[in-house]
Amino acid sequence: MLADFVADFSAKVMHEAEKEATRASHVTQDLWVLHNYGASNACGYRLGLVLEIPNGEVVRQSIRCLDMTNNETEYEAVITGLRLALEYGERHLRLRCDSQLVVNQVIGTFQIKEQRLQKYLSQI
């Protein structure tokens, strides 16, 4: 009985999973993806970004910055990546950001307490 239940249940689940995967692939195949990171340490301040374009092209940028905080470099990396996507004419993309602070401030979960970071949010 248990084997019959598992076999019957598995077939239904697999069918639904396949349908969902097909729907998801159609939605994401034309989606641009921006991966970014900012870093500030004793060696300097850098932005890094990778823009994945649906046609298979990948654009990589690494930029050395002036004196700024780690959070500022994270924001600068997001803004630089968004500008790059706009230069390509793209208006919709998925952002993969490694900064929990920046993500939560942009979506409004966290408040921005530092005045220096307010300007970045308005640019985004």
Image (spheres, helix red, strand yellow):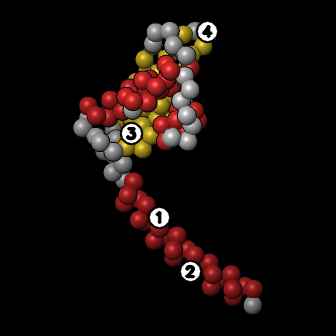
Which numbered dot is residue 21? 1
Please report the residue visible at 51 percent of the width from the left and 74 percent of the height from the top. Answer: 16
Assess disc 2: are there few (<14), some (14-19) or many (≥20) residues with their C-alpha within 10 Å of its C-alpha.
few
How many marks do you count on the picture?
4
Please report the residue visible at 36 percent of the width from the left and 60 percent of the height from the top. Answer: 26
The relative height of residue 24 versus residue 98 in the rendered view (above or below) is below
Residue behind mark 3: 52
Decide which of tag 3 and tag 1 comes sooner along the chain.
1
Using the rendered view, name the quadrant where residue 69 is placed.
top right
Residue behind mark 4: 42
Q: Residue type at mark 3?
A: Glu
Disc 4 versus disc 2: distance between alpha carbons? 56 Å
Q: Secondary structure at mark 4?
A: loop
Disc 3 versus disc 2: distance between alpha carbons? 35 Å
Residue 32, x across and y down, in percent: 36, 43
User: From the viewer's perspective, is the residue at label 3 or at label 4 nearer?
Assistant: 4
